[in-house]
Amino acid sequence: MTKLKFEEVTKQEYKNCSFSTGFVKNHPVDTMYLKLERPPEKPTVIVLRPDEMAAIAWVTSGTLWSHEMTELDKKDA
């Protein structure tokens, strides 16, 4: 089997963790990845198809939107 190559496209770093995404080369089906890093733990890398990556973006955006709506409701109360 050919060794997978990870090509980073985006990365968001924080003081204690980082999140990155990119493309996976030499894989027959899955073409993207999501990497979660929080030392001293080992990084978590999830290899995804484009529709699966879109699903993660959709559900996380929905959670963020719900959080903001809750915060607005608290301010109005």
Image (cartoon, rainbow, N blue to C red):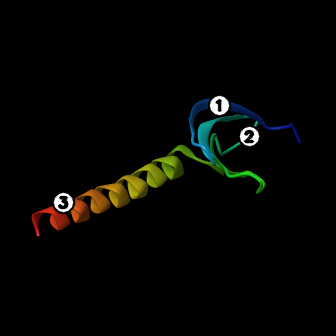
Which residue bears the numbered disc 2?
27
Q: Residue 24: x and y, percent?
A: 69, 36
- Observer-side mark, 3 or 1, equals 3
- Under mark 2, the amino acid is His
Residue neighbourhood size for the residue with mark 1, other residues' Cα within 10 Å, grouped as few (<14), some (14–19), many (≥20): some
- Under mark 1, the amino acid is Glu
31 relative position to 67: left or right: right
- Observer-side mark, 3 or 2, equals 3
CB under 8 Å between discs 3 and 2? no
All told, the count of numbered labels is 3
59 or 13, nearer to the observer: 13
Distance, label 3 to label 2, CA atoms, is 44 Å
63 relative position to 53: left or right: left
27 relative position to 57: left or right: right
Q: Residue 40: x and y, percent?
A: 77, 54
Q: Is residue 8 above or below residue 35?
A: above
- For the N terminus, the image quarter is top right
Which residue bears the numbered disc 3?
72
Q: Image quarter for residue 64?
A: bottom left
Upstream in sequence: badge 3 or badge 1: 1
Upstream in sequence: badge 3 or badge 2: 2
- Under mark 3, the amino acid is Leu
Which residue bears the numbered disc 1?
8
Which residue sits at x=27%, y=57%?
Answer: 68
